[in-house]
Amino acid sequence: MAHFDEKELIELAVENNRHAQHQVYSKYAPKMLSVCRQYIKDLHQAEDIMITAFMKVFTNLQYFEHKGSFEGWIRRIMINECISFIRVQKKVKFIEDENYFEERHNNIESQFSVEDIQFLIDSLPDGYRMIFNLYAIEGYKHHEIATMLSISEGTSKSQLSHARRMLQENVKKLPQGIGYLVGEAEKAGVKFGIWIEPEMVNPKSELYEQHPEWILKLKNRDENLSRNQLVLDMSNPEVQKFVYDVVDQMLTKHPEIAFIKWDCNREMTNTYSEYLGDKQSHIYIDYVKGFYKVSFNRYVARGSSTNFNASVFQEQVVL
């Protein structure tokens, strides 16, 4: 197989030389998939976006002027494609916020490598994660991010501050990560399990701030908290995907987790689904269907050997 220097390889690829295009793809695809994964948590979606972006790379290859890094040029196309996907498919909304705190000791990216905290970065809301990646990992300035995302510089700074604060808080809660706890359990000769409630939300959380329309609550009534939580609308397919991704990413990252207990013991009150609109009479049935779709159908399809306990689910749907 012939190999070419970079400039010659690009020139051949511009001429639709399949061998040259294959070499470009093979050389940069692994790195670019990692780039896409920083923005898109779902690996299969990240792969699809990477492939779409590579199509744009080859379509626009004739416009590369050899004035900078070829890898950097490809990387920018990948990032733009990821941003476009998140903005369009996930309908990310940035709350305009000109007030932020410049925290001198809150540069978490200087304390840990990206690899060390990738699982925490994945847990950030889409908007926070996007701006954190652009600023802290890619090195864009706030005015550049503001232009890219059609937001103000103040909003970019605020979102970065919130993202850093959220990462710091999560590091404090679990400084060595779930993997450390799993390892310690194995050393002690016991299996590690975890108690989760991903279908609940704290009203002071970033998720609530980003997606208030995902919450089951009656309009024009005070929110009814139980155990400091509100219930996510599991009749909504977007919520189903979010909840599934949270659990799936945890188990993919830590396959040693032996079992999970999905509690679901917060009753549903002041129940109204913005997603269902004028079909509110369907809420309880559609909620249960959504929960089963996430916790059983998708879970079983995933093929995990982790034991699953949702025996207390019936407590939540008492009418």
Image (cartoon, rainbow, N blue to C red):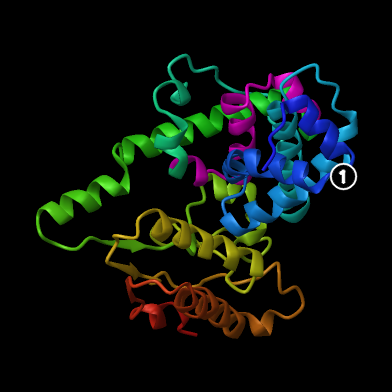
Farthest residue to the left: give it: 188
| Res. 225 visible in picture | no
* Residue 275 on image: x %, y %: 71, 69
As helix, strand or loop, the secondary structure at mark 1 comes to loop
- Which range is magenta? 120-148
Residue highlighted by disc 1:
16
Between 53 and 14, the residue placed more toward the observer is 14
Q: Is residue 36 left or right of residue 87?
A: left
Q: Main secondary structure of the magenta part?
A: helix
Please check the rendered image and state whether residue 299 is part of the magenta-colored stretch, yes or no. no
Farthest residue to the front: give it: 1
* Residue 63 on image: x %, y %: 90, 29
Q: Quadrant of residue 130?
A: top right
Q: Is residue 230 above or below residue 113?
A: below
Residue displayed at 32% across by 69% down = 261
* Residue 232 on image: x %, y %: 55, 64
